[in-house]
Each structure stands twice: as structure tokens, then as C-alpha cells.
């Protein structure tokens, strides 16, 4: 069961996205790229090199619902006619924009983000959301942890690996311990733990960084031999990248704590200092707030910081 990577361009700073073709019955794509003419042409060309057209695709598996991974799903489905599209039920980006709902606004307000900044970020993400066609819940099938997806000569097992997003999933070929991980594992980038409503309690932030560390440890237990990520080259030494990620997260956590004054600060306050050079650029502001809030949530869960609400805004204070 050959896994064929196809590099597809995106308009984002992260660069090309990796789409994976499994050219067996049912012909399957893992992720599809953004809805741009350039991405569609590139994917068509890459598939054609292996004798495949959009109309031949029977199944799409989405690692998560960010636009650079899911954007072409509807176009492919419409051309093929009966393509099944699978995604974890905790994902929402294919249903509406990332900051479109009021629970997103409420979580940003709790993080100390001014309404004017929220409006600017929402406007930016409204534009980004045009890079995917919305799909209704009835048009999708659920990915479930440990479910098995069969092919002619093999199988992929679904692994729910939350962190980057609540519903992020990876796919394991147990025969040789090959993983396809979307943005859970990237060779040259530490994935961002996105600020998201908790699927079980939307008024709360999803504990993205804590869940991400659990996901990394779960993958480590599998002793993968090859890890295909959503961007960049594959990883051949998971142990090395696991340790690098853990060190990077620990270093960032220390930096976040060092920026907390005794009088307390919001996630927004800390993010402005932590990412001072890039804070006002494009999507980086939301990514900065997401990462900072995730680190503060993790530190609070570990007893390193306290949190009190002043009105509806969270203020974090160092405890040790």
C-alpha cells in the first residue's frame, strides 16, 4: 500500500501543503489543499502523474479543517460525484470560519483582547475562509479514534491526536509503523496550539497544549519508523523530534512565566511582549495569542500560575 506525497502550493507563510494519495481501491486522498486555482491545478497535475483524476477519488480523509488542508474537498467531491469525506466531529473549520462564532469572540475577550483587535482578526479570517467551501454536517462522515480504514492490500488506523486543533487526526499503517500526521508533527516547525472552544464546553478554551503533549507521547509509544507531516519533509527519527518539541515547549513556557508580573497580566498582554516583532502581522497575532493562552493554561494546570477573573477578563499571576 504505497503512500504517495503530492506537494500543493498555499498562500500562507508555512508554504506548500502535503497531500497524500493512496492509489488503491478506494482511491483515497489524505488532505487536499486550499481552494485556489494554483492548488487545484497543482493537485490535478500531481494526481495525473499517477493516472488519477479528481473524478477517480472515492474517499477523502481530513487530518483537520484548516483551509490549507480541506479547501478543495467539495470541488473534488462534486467532480467525482460520490466521494466520501471523513473528518473528526470536533472539527469546525469546514462548517464556518475560525473566528466566526460568538464563542470565539467570548474566549478572545476573556484573554484580554480588545474588541477592535478581535474585529480586525475576524475580518482577516473571513477572507481566509474563502479558501474552502463550507460543507454541512450531513455531507461528512466521522473519523473515530481507533477506527480502521480498509484498502485492497492494507489498512490505516485512525488516531485522534488533538492539540493543533481539537479534532486533529493521524493515520497509522501498522504493518510498518508509518504515520500520516497532518500538522501534529512537522519537521521544521513546532505546531501552534490553536485557541479553540472546548467541544464539550464551548464557553471554555480547549486545553490545546496539554492535549498536544499527550498526543505526542501517544505517538511516541508507537515507535514510528516514518512520519509524514502536513508540510515539509518526512520525519525519520521521531524520538529526536519528540525531544526537540518538548525542549522547545519547556523553553517557551519559561519565557511566558518570566513575562508575568506579580500584579498579573492577560494572555493578550503577555503575547504582545512574547511576540513583539511579529505581533501585528497578518495571522501571526491570533497565533501569538493562541500560543500564549495555551501556555498559561498549561502552567495553571501544573500549579505554576493562578488565575482570577476581573469582570469577564482572565488575569494570570505567578505562583512560583
Image (cartoon, rainbow, N blue to C red):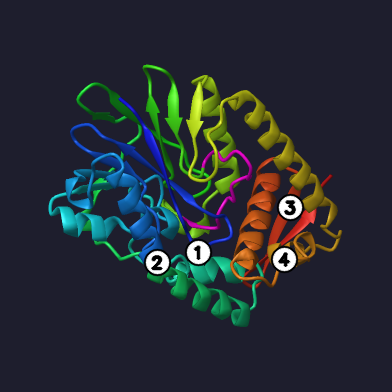
- Whether residues under marks 3 and 1 lie with C-beta atoms below 8 angstroms apart, the answer is no
Residue sitting at the far left: 81
Q: Nearer the viewer, residue 144 or 227?
A: 227
Residue plotted at (44% across, 44% down)? 168
- Whether residues under marks 2 and 1 lie with C-beta atoms below 8 angstroms apart, the answer is yes
Specify start and end residues of the magenta stretch as a single range. 184-197
N-terminal label among 2 and 1 = 1
Report the residue marked by disc 2: 131
- Membership of 58 in magenta stretch: no
- Could you tell me how far apart the alpha carbons at marks 4 and 1 are, in whole angstroms? 18 Å
The residue carrying pointer 4 sits among few (fewer than 14), some (14 to 19) or many (20 or more) residues within 10 Å by Cα, namely: few
Please state the horizontal and vertical placement of residue 200, each as a whole percent of the image.
41, 51
- Could you tell me how far apart the alpha carbons at marks 2 and 3 are, in whole angstroms? 39 Å
Dot 3: element: strand
Dot 2: element: helix
Dot 4: element: loop
Using the image, tell me which numbered label, if any, was put on residue 11. 1
Q: Nearer the viewer, residue 283 or 37?
A: 37
Report the residue marked by disc 4: 278
Q: Is residue 9 above or below residue 2?
A: below
Dot 1: element: loop
Report the residue marked by disc 3: 306
Residue plotted at (23% across, 51% down)? 54
N-terminal label among 3 and 4 = 4
- Could you tell me how far apart the alpha carbons at marks 2 and 1 are, in whole angstroms? 9 Å
Amino acid at each position: 500500500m504505497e503512500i504517495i506525497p503530492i506537494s500543493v502550493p498555499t498562500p500562507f507563510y508555512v508554504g506548500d501543503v502535503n497531500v497524500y494519495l493512496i492509489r488503491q481501491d478506494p482511491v483515497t486522498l489524505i488532505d487536499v489543499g486550499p481552494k485556489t486555482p494554483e492548488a487545484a491545478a497543482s493537485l490535478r497535475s500531481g494526481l495525473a502523474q499517477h493516472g488519477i483524476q479528481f473524478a477517480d477519488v472515492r474517499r477523502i480523509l481530513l487530518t483537520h479543517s484548516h483551509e490549507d488542508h480541506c479547501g478543495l474537498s467539495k470541488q473534488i467531491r462534486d467532480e467525482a460525484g460520490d466521494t466520501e469525506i471523513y473528518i473528526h466531529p470536533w472539527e469546525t473549520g469546514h462548517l464556518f470560519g475560525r473566528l466566526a462564532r460568538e464563542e470565539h469572540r467570548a474566549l478572545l475577550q476573556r484573554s484580554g483582547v480588545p474588541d477592535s483587535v478581535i474585529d480586525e482578526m475576524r475580518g482577516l479570517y473571513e477572507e481566509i475562509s474563502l479558501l474552502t467551501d463550507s460543507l454541512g454536517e450531513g455531507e461528512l462522515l466521522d473519523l473515530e479514534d481507533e477506527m480502521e480504514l480498509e484498502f485492497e492490500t492494507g489498512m490505516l488506523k485512525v488516531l485522534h491526536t488533538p492539540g493543533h486543533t481539537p479534532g486533529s487526526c493521524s493515520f497509522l499503517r501498522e504493518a510498518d509503523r508509518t504515520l500520516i500526521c497532518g500538522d501534529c508533527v512537522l519537521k521544521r516547525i513546532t505546531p501552534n496550539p490553536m485557541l479553540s472552544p472546548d467541544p464539550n464546553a464551548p464557553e471554555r478554551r480547549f486545553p490545546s497544549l496539554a492535549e498536544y503533549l499527550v498526543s505526542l507521547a501517544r505517538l511516541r509509544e508507537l515507535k514510528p519508523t516514518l512520519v509524514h507531516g502536513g508540510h515539509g519533509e518526512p520525519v525519520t527519527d521521531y524520538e529526536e523530534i519528540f525531544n526537540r518539541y518538548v525542549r522547545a515547549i519547556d523553553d517557551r513556557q519559561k519565557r511566558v512565566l518570566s513575562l508575568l508580573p506579580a500584579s498579573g497580566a492577560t494572555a493578550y498582554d503577555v503575547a504582545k511582549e512574547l511576540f513583539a516583532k511579529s505581533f501585528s502581522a497578518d495571522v501571526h497575532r491570533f497565533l501569538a495569542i493562541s500560543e500564549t493562552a495555551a501556555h498559561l493554561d498549561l502552567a495553571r494546570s501544573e500549579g505554576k500560575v493562578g488565575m482570577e477573573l476581573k469582570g469577564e477578563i482572565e488575569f494570570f499571576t505567578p505562583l512560583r
